[in-house]
Amino acid sequence: MSSSPDNPVSSVCWRRRILSPASISAVFAVSLWTATITAGINSGLELPVVHKDVNHHPWERVIPIFANNALAALSLYAGVVLLGTVSVLQTIVLGLFSGGAIHAAAAGLGTSQAIELLVPYFVFEALGLVVATWAGLLPITTLVIGYPFCDEPSPRGWRSRISLYINAVPRTVPLLALAMFFIMVGAVLEVAGGLPR
């Protein structure tokens, strides 16, 4: 296929690559998480802050920490079968809570100590949750946009759109696996950095 700007088919294909369901759902997921975490930080929510002990590394806690965060990721991923609604609602709840936790850590410990407390494990856990939201929103985004790939025509009826939704579900599985990988790395790093006694 020619990439000439005079070729209308090529122009449509280029726009569909940029505005693909995967890219739109990813941008929306990142934007929603950013907005809700920012709102949580600015909320002034007061949460208890527990100081970690950098010499305390109970490695048996890795699996429970992973399981707890994996359940949160699965609740975000549930949007795959619930038209993305659960993904949006859970992102708002978890984003506000995460932002409140960041605010509490910064207020209670100071910014530098809060960064030391949360980085790097929080970064990986947050990435995992963002990717889970992305996965949960991908099928509904595919249905709304109405095409899966740049070289396929838009469906003319809702039956065809529903088939797009169903066909998009398997494409979310690698995203869920990536989310779980990030969450596992986060759990390992959280224990490696030391836990409260």
Image (cartoon, rainbow, N blue to C red):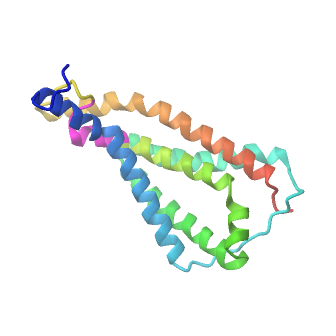
Q: Is residue 124 magenta?
A: no
Q: Quadrant of residue 18?
A: top left
Give the percent coordinates (x, y) of residue 50: 76, 69
At 55% from the left and 80% from the top, the residue drawn is 44
At 29% from the left and 43% from the top, the residue drawn is 141
Give the magenta range: 138-148
In the picture, measured across the screen, residue 27 lies left or right of residue 158, that is right
At 23% from the left and 43% from the top, the residue drawn is 144
Q: Does the rendering let one see residue 83?
A: no
Q: Is residue 70 above or below residue 55?
A: above
Q: Is residue 42 above or below residue 190?
A: below
Q: Looking at the rendering, in which quadrant would you find the N terminus?
A: top left
Give the percent coordinates (x, y) of residue 166: 32, 30
Residue situated furthest right in the rendering: 55
Q: Does the rendering let one see residue 164?
A: yes
Give the percent coordinates (x, y) of residue 80: 39, 40
